[in-house]
Amino acid sequence: MDFTLSEEQIMIRDAARDFARTELLPGVIERDNHQKFPTEQVKKMGELGFLGMMVDPKYGGGGMDTVSYVLVMEELSKIDASCSVIVSVNNSLVCYGLEKYGSEEQKEKYLTKLATGEKLGAFCLSEPEAGSDATSQRTTAIDKGDHYILNGTKNWITNGGTADYYLVIAQTDKEKKHKGINAFIVEKGWEGFEIGPKEDKLGIRGSDTHSLIFNDVKIPKGNRIGEDGFGFKFAMKTLSGGRIGIAAQALGIAAGAYDLAREYSKVRKAFGTEICNHQAIAFKLADMHTSITAARHLVMKAAWDKDQGNDYDMSGAMAKLYASQVAMDVSVEAVQVHGGNGYVKEYHVERLMRDAKITQIYEGTSEIQKIVISRGLLRD
Ligand code: CAA
């Protein structure tokens, strides 16, 4: 396997790096403090093509590969994981799901606007009692002939308040269990669709996370994605790709924390010398860099698998499982390298440490990744 990046991949990675440093860094602490959604930054990311990177240009996307996408995710996440989760959900879950499984009409009407960043998407699977256990959907969509009637509540929805289009997973026939689940496109503003309060989160505080309430929302039949009963597979297949994006986010958080720790260790002095000259610190940097490099290989392998048309359920889950642990470990160590300053907001590492935790929870907890991996191992 050749991981040499093409000129185009290097260009897009450098553009993301430059954007993150110049546009995301300046306000990142304030957005985190005040849970302020990065409206301006999201608009600019749309203009740069970061919101529909892998979508076919005929639907307004960038036509890029998954490797380019994870490079961008890593660079954005080094600075601002709140922005990168917005990018990840829009690209991996919403645009991918629609492009791969949506009808031509759905693509024309919704994907073209989502891929350019004109509109933002959200993916709505989790419920108060259906997080890991995704087949236990309580939200119902009852078939009424030419439309469905949607009722229920969704929880912890990224872009919940800011999205325009929502991919909602709901049960249409309880008897059929996971084969009685469908996915629908729901528009903000439809009668009966209410956005719940914003969650006050530990990390990724610049992104907005809401519960959503559906009270007799009328969905045209044409807004169902795929054949009747395809909703659970739709969610699983889409999440498999989503996990590659979140793995890249975790990698970026780890790499960002490591960069800060390394730089700090070269200027901070203790016992008469820069602290990087003490093995207690130098060995930490060695461990951090080693685990980040291993995580990067797993992330690139998963992205490469997807680009090659290989199965990527397992490689995506392994990348997410490992990279999210590395994000936790490295960000905690980066705070330690900073000592007291690490506990202070202006040094950025405490935010990265808080942001890291979500990568072990959303798009499937670490335990879910282990289910996916072990089932893959034992399938044959
Ligand atoms: N691709 C295609 N089909 C799949 C699949 C995949 N990756 N995974 C499962 N399926 C299919 C199975 O083949 C099976 O179909 P058949 O009966 O036709 O064979 C069906 O789905 C049911 O599969 P399981 O019996 O394996 O289902 P399960 O109940 O045991 O659950 C699970 C499997 C992996 C635990 C799954 O429930 C899961 O992934 N849970 C976690 C959900 C999750 O990631 N939620 C995140 C929310 S979204 C989010 O966080 C976004 C955000 O805001 C950032």
Image (cartoon, helix red, strand yellow):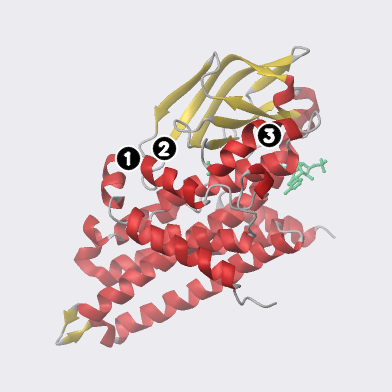
Q: Nearer the viewer, residue 334 or 36?
A: 36
Image vertical order of residue 194 relative to residue 299, above or below: above
User: Residue sitting at 42 percent across and 47 percent down?
Assistant: 44
Mark 2 or mark 3, which is nearer to you?
3
- Secondary structure under the numbered disc 2 in the rendered image: loop
Mark 3 or mark 1, which is nearer to you?
3
- Secondary structure under the numbered disc 3 in the rendered image: helix
Residue 35 disc label: 1
Check disc 3: other Cα within 10 Å, few if <14, some if 14-19, many if 20+.
some
User: Residue sitting at 44 percent across and 58 percent down?
Assistant: 76
Viewed as shown, does residue 125 lie left or right of 174? left
| Image quadrant assignment for residue 280 | bottom left
Q: Nearer the viewer, residue 207 or 136?
A: 207
Check disc 1: other Cα within 10 Å, few if <14, some if 14-19, many if 20+.
many
Query: Nearer the N terminus, badge 3 or badge 1?
Result: 1
| Image quadrant assignment for residue 210 | top left
Image vertical order of residue 364 relative to residue 304, above or below: above
| Amino acid type, residue under disc 1 in the picture | Gln
* Quadrant that contains the C terminus: bottom right
Residue 208 disc label: 2
Q: Are marks 2 and 1 in contact (CB under 8 Å)?
A: yes
Q: Are marks 3 and 1 in contact (CB under 8 Å)?
A: no
| Amino acid type, residue under disc 3 in the picture | Glu
Look at mark 3 in the image and give the residue it sits on.
108
Check disc 2: other Cα within 10 Å, few if <14, some if 14-19, many if 20+.
many
Q: Are marks 2 and 3 in contact (CB under 8 Å)?
A: no
* C-alpha gap between disc 2 and disc 3: 27 Å
Image vertical order of residue 11 relative to residue 267, above or below: above
Viewed as shown, does residue 178 lie left or right of 295? right
Image vertical order of residue 244 relative to residue 278, above or below: above
* Quadrant that contains the N terminus: bottom right
Query: Nearer the N terminus, badge 2 or badge 3?
Result: 3
